[in-house]
Image (cartoon, grey):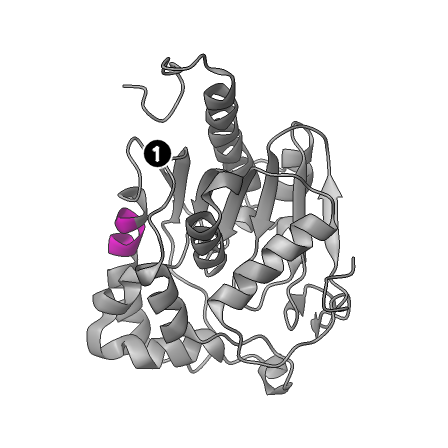
Amino acid sequence: MTLPDGRLIYVDCRGRGSPTVVLESGIHDSSDVWSLTRTEPPVPASPATLPGIARGARVCTYDRPGTIRYTTPPTLTGRSSPVAMPRSLPALVSELDQTLTAAGEKGPYLLVGHSFGGMITRLYAQTHPERTAGLVFVDAFGPEIRDGLGADWPAYARLVNRPGVPLERDPGFETIDLDGAMAAVEKGPRLPSVPMAVISKTAPFEVAPGTPTALMKAVEAAWPRLQDSLVALGPHTPHVLATGSDHYVQLRDPDLVTSTVGLVLNRARDLRTAPPGETPTHGPAAR
C-alpha cells in the first residue's frame, strides 16, 4: 500500500462486514503479534486473534515502520518504508488514518489497541470521533501511568523505548516521544461516546535480563490503577481480566480477545441500527 507521501506500508485485511475492526500493535511490535498464539493448557488451542476475528467481521492490521517481525531470528519489518525516529503520537494517528484510506477501508472503525497501541487508538478516536465505532483496550498504556509512577516515570519511559533487545541498536528501531504522546492525549478532545471494553493481564510483565527489579515492581503496582482509569473512560465498560496471561493477551488467550471484540462489535452494530431515541438492550447504555 502506498501512502500520500510515497511511503510503502504493509496492510493485512481479511473477512467481511461492518464496521471494520482495526488491530493496533504495541510499541516495537509488527502486525505479526495478531497472527500468532502462545497458548498453554488449560487455555485450548484456538485461532490467532486476526483470523479469529475475520471469521465474523472485516479486520485489518498493518506494520508501523521500525517494528519487529516475529521471525527466526527477529528482524525489523522490511514491509513498510523506514522513517526518522523518534515519532510523535499525532504522526502515528495520521499514518493510521492514511493507511486505512489507502486500503479503501471506510469508517467508522472498531479500534483495538494493545499496550502503546491503545494510545494510538485513543487519540485517533479523540481526533476522528465520526470514524470511531468502538474501542477495545488490550492491557493498554495510558497517560495515567506517568502520575502512577511518579519519580520512576523517566526510567520507565527509557525502558519502554529501549527495552534491552539487540534490534534497538538499529537506527530505524521504533521509538516514540512518550512525554509528547501523553500531552497529546491529555490536551485532545473528549473521547466519543462509543462502546468500549478493557482487557487486562494478571501475570507479571516479561522483561529482558538486567531490567531493574525495583522499577518493574513499581510498574506492576501502578498497572492495575492504569487499567481502572481506562475502564472509567466510558460508562458501562466491561473490564475483562485475562487470568494467567501476561501483557501479550492476544498471544496467550486469543479467543478471549476475539470474544471481547465480538461483544463490542455487536454493541456498535446495535447502536447503528437502533431507531432514533431508542436505547439498544445490548448497547453501552444498557443497565
Instruction: Identify the residue at image location x=74%, y=71%.
Output: 81
- The image quadrant that residue 52 belongs to is top right
Q: Is residue 209 magenta?
A: no
- The image quadrant that residue 178 belongs to is bottom left
For the C terminus, the image quarter is top left
Q: Is residue 119 above or below residue 245?
A: below
Q: Nearer the viewer, residue 29 or 106?
A: 106
Q: Position of residue 21 (x, y in %)?
A: 59, 39
CA neighbours of label 1 inside 10 A, class few (<14), some (14 to 19), many (20+): some
Q: Position of residue 269 (x, y in %)?
A: 52, 23
Q: Position of residue 218 (x, y in %)?
A: 25, 69
Which residue range is magenta in the image? Answer: 224-229
Answer yes or no: is residue 89 visible. Answer: yes
Label 1, on which residue? 238
For badge 1, the amino acid type reads Pro
Q: Position of residue 142 (x, y in %)?
A: 35, 59
Q: Nearer the viewer, residue 189 or 283?
A: 189
Instruction: Identify the residue at image location x=55%, y=64%.
Output: 92
